Structures are given as C-alpha cells and as structure tokens.
Amino acid sequence: MEEGPVRIRLPKGNEMIGIVESMLGGGRVRVICKDGNVRIGRIPGKLKSRIWMHVGDAIIIKPWETQSNERCDVVWVYRRNEKYWLEKRGYLNF
C-alpha cells in the first residue's frame, strides 16, 4: 500500500514548533519551544473558539518582535494524528 501526499503544515519563516506545558487561562499557554526557551503564548480568538488545546499538544508559535525569548503567538494546533506524524519524522525531538 502506497502512501499519498501528506499535507501537514510545517513552520515557515521565524515560526517554530512547541509543546504546550500548561494552560494559564485568559487565552494564554506556557510553551516549551524547539529552541529551548519557555514562552508565554497568546491564543488568538479564531483558534480559541474553534479548537481545544490540552497540555502536551504540539503547536506552531511565532515569537513576538519585542520580547522574542519570552512571548509568542499561537499560529497552529496539530491534531493527534499529525502529532504522531511529526514524532515519527523527528520534528518533536527536543
């Protein structure tokens, strides 16, 4: 059985993959990022109303222009099967 093309969104530009460490409330999460920093992430309203996030979820974040080592915006949330694909291919090894 051959696999078809896989369409999983990967980080572009200055975006990076992170793992949700804890939920802080008020539309914020604490994220462990691929570069080793722990950042406070802001969840935009379009994601807040449509997607539930849990501790351990893989996400794409975009660091802020200022406070780039402390703050970020959440851009994308991976589903469970997408997270498994990322783990299998080595994107979540950090």
Image (spheres, helix red, strand yellow):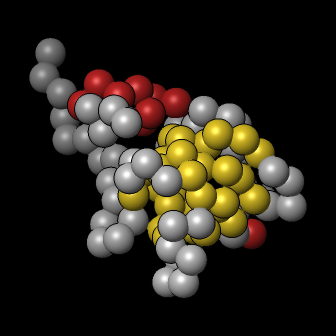
In the image, residue 34 above or below residue 43: above
In this rendering, position of residue 75 left or right of residue 21: left
Residue farthest along the bottom direction in this orientation? 66
**Splitting the image into 4 quarters, where does residue 74 fall?**
bottom right
In the image, residue 89 above or below residue 45: above
In this rendering, position of residue 63 left or right of residue 45: left
In the image, residue 14 above or below residue 53: below
Residue farthest along the top direction in this orientation? 1
At x 67%, y 50%, the residue is: 30
At x 15%, y 15%, the residue is: 1
State the quadrant of the C terminus: top left
Query: Would residue 49 be visible to someone looking at this image?
Result: yes
At x 30%, y 39%, the residue is: 91
Residue farthest along the right direction in this orientation? 26
Q: Nearer the viewer, residue 45 or 35?
A: 35
Give the percent coordinates (x, y) of residue 54.
Answer: 70, 37
Give the percent coordinates (x, y) of residue 25.
Answer: 86, 53
Give the percent coordinates (x, y) of residue 50.
Answer: 72, 55
Q: Nearer the viewer, residue 81 or 55?
A: 55
